[in-house]
């Protein structure tokens, strides 16, 4: 874990993203400072005006009033200018940061997404970036302007009378100590609040995606109780934040008022003693009152800044995440891809696997000739699905290599690799887009004829009966469709990409027997020219392949045709009989 940076160093990391917006933000600061300077200049004229009035110079009243009115109007115009200058730059910074975050999330390997709850990522992309935008446009500008105004204001107070200024300064000095204590305590609770907000977002997302399961088991109330527990924890944290801000506000209001009271008492004595004029005392008090808002706002602005710091930290936790699966500096290409897929002594273990646990895949070797289809079978947990993910670098091998036409896939760009290989997963994921966009996701340039052919192979002609045909928008994750319909569209998506190598992870598990037979018959036509690795959980799927690889404890223990393995491998016969029994039980249930 990296050491925590100071508030300044953390916020300084925004500069590369805010570089284009900085000119307008700085001009906004200048405008805010200008507005405060106009406000501070008014007491200067009040000093002469009051002294003149005390001396009986009534003629100075009207010009002074007009001048003070002009200064007030100038202050208002500068406030308006400040708002106009800072209104839009933060929005562009937020958009750039959100795009960078999304691109990073797409680039990071699957192992990262296995560890991170989606709600935490969502809260960073929405809530945290929104807070950063508001801080850049409002918090930063006012914090700089108000701090500078306080410094200038204190200098002015000392210029009126050194002793009055010293009294005011010493009485206000504890604010600095309180501010440092506030930074430490509030920073911790602000980070906790943002993390709890991410956990709450995860809870909501899981409940929405799993609403069918919750309803089916009558566990909606249980989910609501879990949500209420998390929400209550967040509420408690937000109350702690509010109390912390309220406490510092107490001191930020009380101490300046106390300082002003002491200064006023001392000033009256000085006026009575003839050391200062009434106009000077009035100007001193008026200047102190102008400084009241910049002082009182420090509590809010400090809290805002610390929340922004926490948001920046959370943003860069993702941005700084090392991408362990990246493109090589000098990538190799396959000039004339034939579809030769070879696993050479491949080993793999998940990053969080205990050191004393064996590799999930160990010394796995398998060669698929161009145009050859191989069924991969084995008992549950032997590593079949994990192996398919290694072929497209969704995970990185920890030993050995995977090669396509003799080129290690780590030496290719991921873009080229994933044009050579297409996958269809057992758990078919569709997107909230049209049928056409979902099927052509792997290769949007394919023609209508290619699209039609892919749908026919996958026996997905049901899409033509949907309300808008191919332009029908599928609901979130395709849950408006049946499991079999989703699988057929996912299979059509893989076929439509026209890859040299097709990896199928039990893509027919949700189909009925008749539909499965038609899909298998159509796939045989495709598989005559495409290299295919098929994870099989049914005997009928095994029959699709030219050869069968039997996997056991992360290794290939037998390889050959179905008939050959039936004759020579006891373990193969056991696995096939298990698959056959499961298939018959499934048919009975159907």
Image (spheres, rainbow, N blue to C red):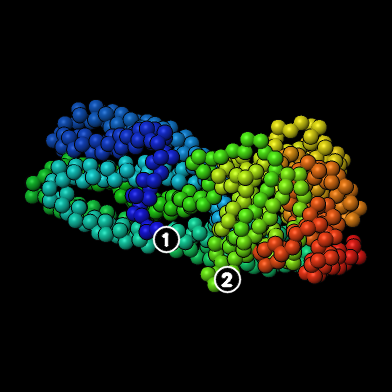
For label 1, the crowd category at 10 Å Cα-Cα, with few meaning under 14, some 14 to 19 and many 20 or more, is: few
Position of the C terminus by quadrant:
bottom right
Residue at image point 79% right, 67% down: 569
Residue at image point 65% right, 43% down: 405
Kindly identify which residue carries mark 2. 357
The image quadrant that residue 184 belongs to is bottom left
Q: Secondary structure at mark 1?
A: loop
Task: Give whichever of discs 1 and 2 has the lower sequence position.
Answer: 1
Q: Nearer the viewer, mark 1 or mark 2?
A: 2
Kindly identify which residue carries mark 1. 1
Q: Nearer the viewer, residue 290 or 420?
A: 420
Across and down, in percent, residue 10 comes to 38, 50
Residue 480 in the figure: left or right of residue 381: right
Residue at image point 33% right, 30% down: 74
Across and down, in percent, residue 520 comes to 85, 49
For label 2, the crowd category at 10 Å Cα-Cα, with few meaning under 14, some 14 to 19 and many 20 or more, is: few
Q: Nearer the viewer, residue 167 or 578?
A: 578
Circle number at residue 489: none
Residue furthest bottom in the image = 356
Residue 505 in the figure: left or right of residue 581: left
Q: Secondary structure at mark 2?
A: loop
Position of the N terminus by quadrant:
bottom left
Judge whether residue 475 can be spotted in this image. no
Q: Nearer the viewer, residue 490 or 82?
A: 490
Judge whether residue 182 can be spotted in this image. yes
Across and down, in percent, residue 463 comes to 83, 41
Location of residue 443 with respect to 208 vertically, above or below: above
Across and down, in percent, residue 478 comes to 75, 49
Residue at image point 74% right, 67% down: 379
Whether the residues at callouts 1 and 2 have beta carbons within 8 Å, the answer is: no
């Amino acid at each position: 874990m990296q050491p925590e940076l100071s508030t300044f160093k953390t916020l300084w990391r925004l500069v590369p993203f805010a570089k284009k917006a900085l000119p307008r933000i700085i001009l906004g600061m200048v405008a805010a400072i200008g507005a405060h300077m106009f406000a501070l200049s008014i007491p200067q004229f009040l000093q002469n005006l009051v002294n003149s009035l005390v001396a009986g110079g009534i003629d100075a009243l009207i010009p002074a009033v007009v001048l003070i009115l002009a200064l007030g109007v100038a202050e208002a115009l500068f406030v308006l200018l400040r708002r106009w200058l800072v209104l839009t730059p933060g929005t562009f910074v937020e958009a750039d940061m959100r795009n960078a975050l999304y691109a990073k999330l797409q680039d990071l390997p699957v192992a990262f997404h296995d560890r991170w709850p989606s709600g935490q990522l969502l809260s960073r992309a929405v809530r945290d970036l929104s807070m950063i935008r508001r801080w850049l446009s409002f918090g930063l500008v006012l914090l700089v302007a108000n701090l500078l105004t306080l410094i200038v204001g204190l200098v002015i107070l000392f210029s009126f009378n050194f002793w009055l200024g010293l009294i005011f300064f010493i009485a206000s000095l504890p604010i600095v100590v309180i501010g440092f204590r506030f930074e430490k305590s509030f920073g911790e609770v602000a980070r906790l609040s943002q993390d709890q907000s991410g956990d709450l977002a995860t809870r909501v997302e899981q409940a929405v995606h799993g609403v069918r399961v919750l309803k089916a088991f009558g566990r909606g109330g249980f989910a609501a109780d879990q949500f209420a527990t998390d929400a209550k924890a967040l509420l408690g944290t937000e109350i702690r934040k509010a109390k912390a801000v309220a406490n510092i506000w107490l001191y930020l209001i009380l101490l300046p008022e106390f300082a002003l009271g002491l200064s006023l008492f001392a000033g009256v004595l000085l006026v009575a003693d003839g050391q200062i004029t009434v106009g000077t005392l009035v100007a001193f008090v008026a200047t102190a009152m102008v400084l009241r808002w910049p002082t009182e706002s420090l509590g809010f602005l400090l809290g805002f800044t610390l929340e922004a710091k926490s948001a920046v930290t959370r943003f860069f936790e993702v941005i700084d995440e090392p991408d362990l699966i990246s493109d090589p500096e000098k990538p190799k290409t396959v000039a004339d891809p034939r579809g030769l897929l070879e696993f050479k002594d491949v080993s793999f273990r998940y990053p969080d696997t205990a050191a004393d646990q064996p590799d999930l895949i160990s010394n796995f070797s398998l060669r698929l000739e161009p145009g050859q289809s191989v069924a991969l079978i084995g008992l549950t947990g032997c590593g079949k699905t994990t192996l398919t993910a290694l072929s497209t670098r969704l995970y990185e091998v920890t030993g050995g290599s995977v090669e396509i036409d003799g080129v290690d896939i780590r030496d290719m760009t991921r873009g080229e690799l994933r044009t050579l290989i297409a996958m269809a997963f057992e758990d078919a994921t569709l997107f909230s887009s049209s049928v056409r966009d979902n099927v052509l996701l792997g290769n949007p340039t394919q023609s209508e004829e290619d699209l039609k052919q892919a749908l026919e192979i996958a026996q997905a002609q049901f899409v033509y009966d949907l309300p808008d045909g191919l332009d029908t928008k599928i609901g979130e994750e395709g849950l408006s469709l049946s499991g079999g319909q989703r699988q057929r569209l996912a299979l059509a998506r893989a076929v439509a990409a026209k890859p040299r190598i097709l990896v199928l992870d039990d893509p027919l598990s949700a189909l009925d027997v008749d539909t499965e037979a038609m899909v298998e018959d159509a796939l045989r036509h495709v598989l005559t020219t495409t290299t295919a690795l098929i994870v099989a959980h049914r005997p009928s799927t095994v029959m699709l392949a030219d050869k069968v690889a039997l996997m056991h404890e992360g290794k290939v223990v037998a390889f050959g045709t179905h008939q050959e393995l039936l004759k020579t491998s006891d373990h193969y016969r056991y696995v096939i009989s298990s698959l056959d029994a499961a298939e018959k039980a499934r048919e009975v249930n159907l």
